Each structure stands twice: as C-alpha cells, then as structure tokens.
Amino acid sequence: MSRALATTTASKRSPLPADLDATRLPAHVAVIMDGNGRWASRRGLPRVMGHREGVEALKRTLRLCSDWGIGALTAYAFSTENWNRPGEEVGFLMTLFERVLARELEALEQEQVRIRFLGDLEPLPAGLRELIANATARTAHNSGIHFNVCTNYGGRAELVRAARLLAERVAAGELDPASINEDLFAAQLHTAGERDPDLLIRTSGEQRISNFLLWQLAYAELHITNVLWPDFDERALHAALLDYQGRQRRFGGVDAAGA
Ligand code: IPE
Ligand code: IPE
Ligand code: MG
C-alpha cells in the first residue's frame, strides 16, 4: 500500500501556477546552479553537503519544468574552471554525478526525459563517461523535456572547438570559408539542434556569466536570485518565470507599441 502511494505521489504533476501564461513560457531555461558551498557553510556543514542537496534542487526543477511544459532545461553542473577546486571536492562531485546518474536513469526514462551532457567529456572518469554514454543512448528518442547537463563545460572552450572544427573542414577542402555563417557556426556547438535559452537563472546572487553559454545567451533574459541553489524550489522557479513574463524582448528592434 505504501508503495502504491509512493507511486501515485511520484507521478503527480504540478499544475502551472494560475498567474503564469502558458502560451508565453520560455521554451528553454538555462540555470547556473550556484551557492551550494555557501548553503552548507551556513549550516556548519562541509561544502560537499551543499552539492548533495543541490541534486535534489535539480530534480525538483527538472520535474517542474517538465510539468509546466518548458521544452528544455540546461544546467551548469561543472565548469572547465571548477577543476581548480580542491581535489577532494572535485572527486566528490564526480562520484556524485556517477551515483545520481545510475540511480535516476530509470526515472528519467519513465518520464520521457532526453538527457545529454554538454562539454568536453574526455577528461571525466571512465566510469562516469560510460554512464553518460548509456544514459544518452537510452533516452535519445524520448519525447519529453530536453535536459542538458553541462559537465566540464566552458563557453570559451566550446567556441574555440567550433572554430577548430570549421578550420579542419576548410583545410580538408570541404568547406568554403565564405559559407561560414551564424547557423553553420552554431551547428558546431555542443548545443547544436537546441534553440537558444530564453531565460537564464543564476542563483546565489552573483551577477556574472562565469563562462556559461557565451554564444547561446546572446538574447536571453537574465534572472538573478539570492536564493542559494539547494533552496531553489517551486516558489523560486515561479518567481523567475513571472519575472520573465514581465519582460519586453526586443532583440534589437522596437517593441510592438513602438515605445
Ligand atoms: C555551485 O555551487 C556548484 C558547482 C560549481 C559545482 P558552489 O560550489 O559554487 O557554491 P558556492 O558558490 O561556493 O557557494
Ligand atoms: C559556475 O559557478 C559554475 C557552475 C555552477 C557549475 P562557480 O561558483 O564556479 O562560478 P564563480 O567562480 O562564482 O564565477
Ligand atoms: Mg559558486
């Protein structure tokens, strides 16, 4: 009986809050999940406990985005600069990624989530790479939300890689440099095939991009909240979406009223 109850609870969908316009939701939300360390320090806990709690926040956010009809969620999990952290913290994070991925794969499959990992995956531990390859393949044809986890991701590295890929094709005589345009360039990025994020959320109050999606965020609306990532919940996502829906996106033009 308790099992049945758990199943029912797990499959319950959260309705979209009434003050949000379902027709004007961001199609793609990106999030810089920051503040795990501070969350833990404030509780007198080791920093890594904040990372553990951050996983719960990510699961909540993915579930809500999926329930509310947002097409894609891209989360910054580990930057190319995060290798500069103490070895113990880096090691904890890699093990955490492995454990969570192994544990959650079945649920992701059931929820029709299509998971991908964006970044240079080569330097990741072999066990993690295997899990990533498996999860990517097993969810590739799922019809639900696109869930992108940026792991050993850096915006500059991504741009340099794109330039190199194009240069190689030019050098091989396969590509005319004059035919390189924005679409062809974007097609070399890890995010190829995904539309650009409409909304970027950064938690913990830092007002910077930290080498995240430098190309793709060109016209994203920015929402910075003081909430620390492990505390990010339905209320915080709701607030971000309300903020987004209050914006006038102009893309360099003038708004509809011509103001
Ligand atoms: C974000 O939280 C998680 C990662 C970068 C992996 P932090 O670990 O950066 O937390 P703060 O910013 O030190 O509080
Ligand atoms: C950005 O957070 C990277 C991730 C959330 C994975 P950081 O905590 O690494 O960024 P800085 O150092 O404050 O710019
Ligand atoms: Mg941080």
Image (tube, rainbow, N blue to C red):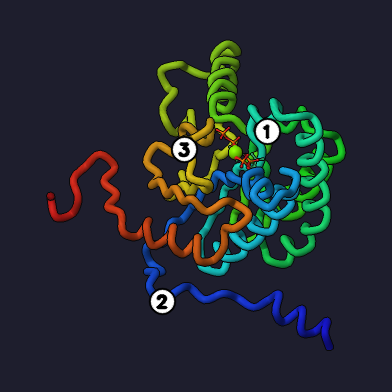
In x, y percent, where is residue 168?
Answer: 60, 16
Residue marked by disc 3: 216
Mark 1 nearby-residue class (10 Å; few <14, some 14–19, many ≥20): many
Residue marked by disc 1: 152
Counting residues from the N terminus, which is met first, the one under dot 2 or under dot 3?
Answer: 2
Counting residues from the N terminus, which is met first, the one under dot 1 or under dot 3?
Answer: 1
Amino acid tagged 3: Gln
Image: 32 above or below 10 = above
In x, y percent, where is residue 127?
Answer: 87, 39
Question: In the image, is 61 to the left or to the right of 93?
Answer: left
- Badge 3 element: loop
Q: Nearer the viewer, mark 1 or mark 3?
A: 1
Image: 128 above or below 172 = below
Residue at x-position 64% and y-position 49%? 42
Q: CA distance from mark 2 to mark 3?
A: 30 Å
Residue marked by disc 2: 18
Q: Quadrant of the N terminus?
A: bottom right
Pick the front one: 124 or 35: 35
- Badge 2 element: loop
Q: Quadrant of residue 89?
A: top right
In the displayed image of the protein, which residue is found farthest to the front?
A: 44
Quadrant of ligand 3 in image: top right
Question: In the image, is 154 to the left or to the right of 53?
Answer: left
Amino acid tagged 1: Asn
